[in-house]
């Protein structure tokens, strides 16, 4: 099964609908009701997508990302992530309604699964909601009804392509898009580093067959800025979009030690 961007868009819509029926931990995990712009009052909508390919097999990638409460590859120390689904800790079988809780960069993060699938031969599909949180160091608040990642084998199984896409609402959509973009790009790069640090260039360079879906660094982001509700932020690769994104990119991989979701 290969997921095109059109297929992902369809799944995003379906997952958002499912999120309305999944039980989210009411104490702190609930999402605020949407206003006329699709977001709560004082928030503005945006979306961000990161496409990245690592020259490692799907099974290798799954060994890093395949446990919902192990986020060492995303900056959280081992055994620091908790869940409301204690049975899954032993089975590693994560289901809709499962939430994970962790604290990082001064923020308490709650992410609740709406869709989860990890067949042996791919693709890995994980969609969750992101409860409201604040990143004080960038003076931004945001939440998301769809925060998804898909990893699928490409190049005849010799590489794995990732798609991180989030639909979010932020107090400043420009800053929110930049922060989320950096976080997801850093996550994707870190998975490759965990597996050996080789860079993907092409299927031909791997000696395999197939066509990779997306080249490294390819991305898209958009969000309505708070300073001008009509202004739209758009970005290409990390560090090439705006001063905000470029400034964040200076921190590079080091940022993930202090700021990862």
Image: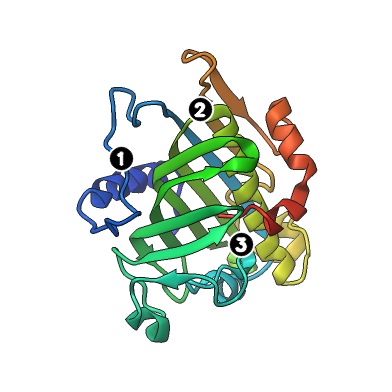
Q: Which of marks 1 and 2 is nearer the N terminus?
A: 1
Residue 201 visible from this viewpoint: no
> x%, y% of residue 13?
31, 42
Q: How far apart are marks 3 and 2 (CA)?
A: 24 Å
User: Which residue is labeled 2 in the image?
Assistant: 223
The quarter in which the C terminus is drawn is bottom right
User: Which residue is labeled 1 in the image?
Assistant: 32
> Residue, x 27% and y 56% (percent of image)?
26
| Farthest residue, direction left | 21
Location of residue 87 by image quarter: bottom left
> x%, y% of residue 212?
61, 53
**Residues at circles 1 and 2 in contact by the CB criterion of under 8 Å:** no
**Residues at circles 3 and 2 in contact by the CB criterion of under 8 Å:** no
The quarter in which the N terminus is drawn is bottom left
Mark 2 surroundings: few (<14), some (14-19) or many (≥20) residues within 10 A: many
Q: Distance between the residues labelled 1 and 3?
A: 26 Å
Instruction: Judge left or right: residue 95 versus residue 111.
Output: left
Mark 3 surroundings: few (<14), some (14-19) or many (≥20) residues within 10 A: many
> Could you say which is closer to the camera, residue 209 or residue 179?
179
Instruction: Judge left or right: residue 94 versus residue 17.
Output: right
Q: How far apart are marks 1 and 2 (CA)?
A: 19 Å
> x%, y% of residue 201?
75, 53
Q: Is mark 2 on a helix, strand or loop?
A: strand
> Residue, x 33% and y 74% (percent of image)?
85
Checking the image for residue 74, the label placed there is 3
Q: Which of marks 1 and 3 is nearer the N terminus?
A: 1
Checking the image for residue 253, the label placed there is none
Q: What element carries label 3?
A: helix
Judge whether 166 appears above or below 202 on screen.
above
């Amino acid at each position: 099964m290969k997921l095109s961007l059109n297929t992902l868009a369809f799944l995003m819509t379906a997952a958002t609908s499912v999120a309305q029926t999944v039980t989210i931990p009411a104490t702190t995990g609930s999402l605020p009701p949407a206003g006329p712009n699709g977001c709560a009052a004082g928030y503005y909508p945006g979306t961000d997508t990161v496409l990245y390919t690592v020259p490692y097999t799907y099974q290798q990638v799954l060994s890093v990302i395949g446990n919902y409460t192990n986020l060492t590859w995303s900056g959280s120390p081992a055994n620091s992530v908790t869940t409301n689904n204690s049975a899954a800790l032993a089975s590693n079988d994560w289901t809709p309604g499962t939430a994970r809780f962790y604290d990082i960069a001064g923020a308490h993060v709650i992410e609740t699964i709406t869709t989860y699938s990890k067949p042996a031969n791919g693709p890995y599909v994980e969609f969750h909601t992101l409860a409201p949180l604040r990143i004080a160091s960038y003076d931004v608040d945001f939440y998301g009804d769809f925060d998804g990642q898909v990893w699928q084998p490409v190049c005849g199984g010799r590489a794995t392509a990732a798609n991180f896409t989030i639909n979010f609402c932020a107090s400043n959509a420009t800053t929110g898009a930049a922060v989320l973009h950096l976080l997801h790009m850093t996550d994707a790069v870190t998975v490759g580093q965990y597996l050996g640090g080789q860079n993907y260039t092409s299927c031909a360079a791997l000696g395999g067959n197939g066509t990779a879906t997306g080249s490294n660094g390819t991305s898209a982001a958009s969000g309505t800025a708070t300073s001008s509700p009509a202004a739209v932020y758009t970005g290409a690769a990390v560090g090439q979009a705006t001063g905000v994104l470029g400034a964040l990119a200076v921190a590079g991989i080091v940022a993930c030690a202090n700021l990862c979701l």
